[in-house]
Amino acid sequence: MAKPERKKHDKEDREGSDLIEKLVGINRVTSVTKGGKKFKMAAMVLIGDGKGRVGYGTGKSKEVPEAIAKATNAAKRNMVRIPLREGRTLHHDVRGRYGAGKVVLRTAPAGTGIIAGGPMRALFEALGIHDVVAKSVGSSNPHNMIKATFAALNDMASPRSVALRRGKKVNEILGKKAADEAGAKE
């Protein structure tokens, strides 16, 4: 008896309906050959669900729509989960670096909004962060900024994960005052 065929993209189609897609940049890449110049397009796309999952991808092709489609598929494959405090901001301040791109990400109180420029703003919107202060120091290249921001976000640790790693309770990690505040909010 033959196995029923499963479509590879069924899961992606179901997930794709609620994903936020942001086009960060499109570059025209030229390669000079004996016969003349050949033009290709390179695209960078961010994808997030607005609830703590985000990914980025790049794609190249002769046509812009194909490059965007390749970048979108790469971004879906590279999605990671980032822990958020109260679903709106970061747990703690963090720094990230990739090549010459350096970023500083800081937590912010409710109502601050997203204070960040360029590609970082798009990343935070796709991720679902509502309050954050970010600064890019060094390279303003979108690729380096995104990769540095991802490096910073991957260093993020929630109090629950730290407590689990140390074999303690969350109250012991946060301290009595913070634990009382967290209990009062719930």
Image (spheres, helix red, strand yellow):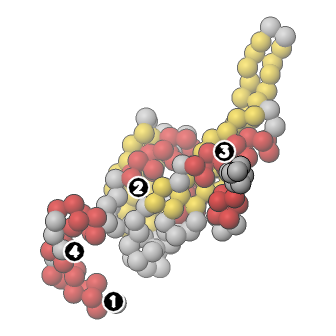
The disc, 2 or 1, on the residue closer to the chain's N-terminal end is 2
Q: Which amino acid type corresponds to the residue marked 3 in the rendered image?
A: Ala
Gap between marks 4 and 3 measured at Cα: 39 Å
Q: CA distance from mark 3 to mark 1?
A: 41 Å
Q: Nearer the viewer, mark 2 or mark 4?
A: 4
Asked whether the beta carbons under mark 1 and mark 4 sit within 8 Å of each other, the answer is: no
Q: Dot 3 surroundings within 10 Å: few (below 14), some, or many (20 or more)?
A: many
State the residue position of label 3. Answer: 71
- The reply to whether residue 66 is in sight is yes
Task: Pick whichever of labels 3 and 1 is earlier in the sequence.
Answer: 3
Q: Residue at x 44, y 66 (%)?
A: 132
- Residue at the location (34% across, 90% down)? 186
Q: CA distance from mark 3 to mark 2?
A: 21 Å
Asked if 106 appears above or below 96 in the picture, the reply is below
Q: Amino acid at mark 1?
A: Lys
Residue at screen point 81% across, 37% down: 63
Earlier along the polypeptide chain: callout 2 or callout 4?
A: 2
Which residue matches tag 1? Answer: 185
**Regarding mark 3 in the picture, which secondary structure is present there?**
helix
Which numbered mark, 1 or 4, is in the foreground of this view? 4
Q: Secondary structure at mark 4?
A: helix
Mark 1, other Cα within 10 Å: few <14 / some 14–19 / many ≥20: few
* Looking at the image, residue 73 lies above or below residue 173: above
Mark 1–mark 4 Cα distance, whole angstroms, equals 15 Å
Amino acid beneath label 4: Val
Give the image location of residue 10, x and y in percent: 69, 58
- The three-letter code of the residue at mark 2 reads Leu
Q: Residues within 10 Å of mark 4 (few under 14, many from 20)?
A: some
Q: Which residue is labeled 4 in the image?
A: 170
Q: Is residue 100 above or below residue 167?
A: above
Give the labeled residue for mark 2: 153
